[in-house]
Amino acid sequence: MGEGRVTDLDTTRLSLFPLAGAILFPGLQLPLHIFEPRYRALVADALARDRLIGMVQPRSTAENAPLFSIGCLGRIGEVEALDYGRFNLILEGVSRFRIERELSAETAFRQARALLLEEPEDEVLNPVERASFEEEARRFASLQGYTVNWEQVARLDDETLINGVSQVAPFDAASKQALLEADGIRKRCELLIQLMQFYSMRGDDDAVTLQ
């Protein structure tokens, strides 16, 4: 999977950033504004060590809620230190992970032992799958009133296209979690088509712009 795979880092112990509705996929970027004290501490710790943070969704909005088992490891790229210890940063998706167990930690932020998930080597869509996805994406965009740069879409490789739409599409958090848990681009593409069809039938009125 290119840059998305990590094989030379000790990633068995991950510092976790549980954030509902914020999904990161390998190879993509997620902008974050860090202001809560425990997550300011998390970022400061990551910057002092390996710049790695495990993004994962909580299962509810309760304090210290149980976590979904699948998340995405991110590497801090651009970072801007602000007043009062706050940060603006860009997190770059590296690899999906599966939480094996959460650890007792003295830090303000949560930690876990996790296993990195390797993606299928050099997986691509065949021409029929790619064409079917783009056809459904055009239909979905038209029905929902989205503005899409289709020339730019055509230039994207399969991984960037499928992961990119999975991350930015206006699906609910559970649907995006299901996409993150799908193993490989082809399975994620199949689920993405199903979700676009479902949301089209539902008649969601919210419009977004996909760049």
Image (tube, rainbow, N blue to C red):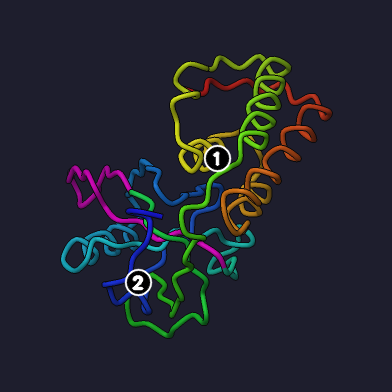
At x 19% / y 61%, what residue is drawn? 47
Give percent across and percent down for residue 188.
63, 48
Q: Measured along the vertical axis of the image, is residue 56 above or below residue 202? A: below
Instruction: Indicate the quadrant where residue 131 lies.
Output: top right
Give percent across and percent down for residue 206.
66, 23
Circles 1 and 2: CB distance less than 8 Å? no
Amino acid type for the residue under numbered disc 2: Ala
Q: Residue furthest right?
A: 201
SS at mark 1? helix
At x 41% / y 66%, what residue is drawn? 16
At x 45% / y 59%, what residue is drawn? 72
Q: What range of the chain is rendered magenta?
A: 70-91
Check disc 1 and report the residue beneath it: 162
Does 26 sit left or right of 44 as displayed?
right
Give percent across and percent down for residue 110.
41, 72
Crowding at dot 1, Cα within 10 Å, few <14 / some 14-19 / many 20+, comes out as many
Queried whether the magenta region covers residue 61, the answer comes back as no
Check disc 2 and report the residue beneath it: 108
Amino acid type for the residue under numbered disc 1: Ile
Q: Measured along the vertical axis of the image, is residue 178 above or below residue 90? A: below
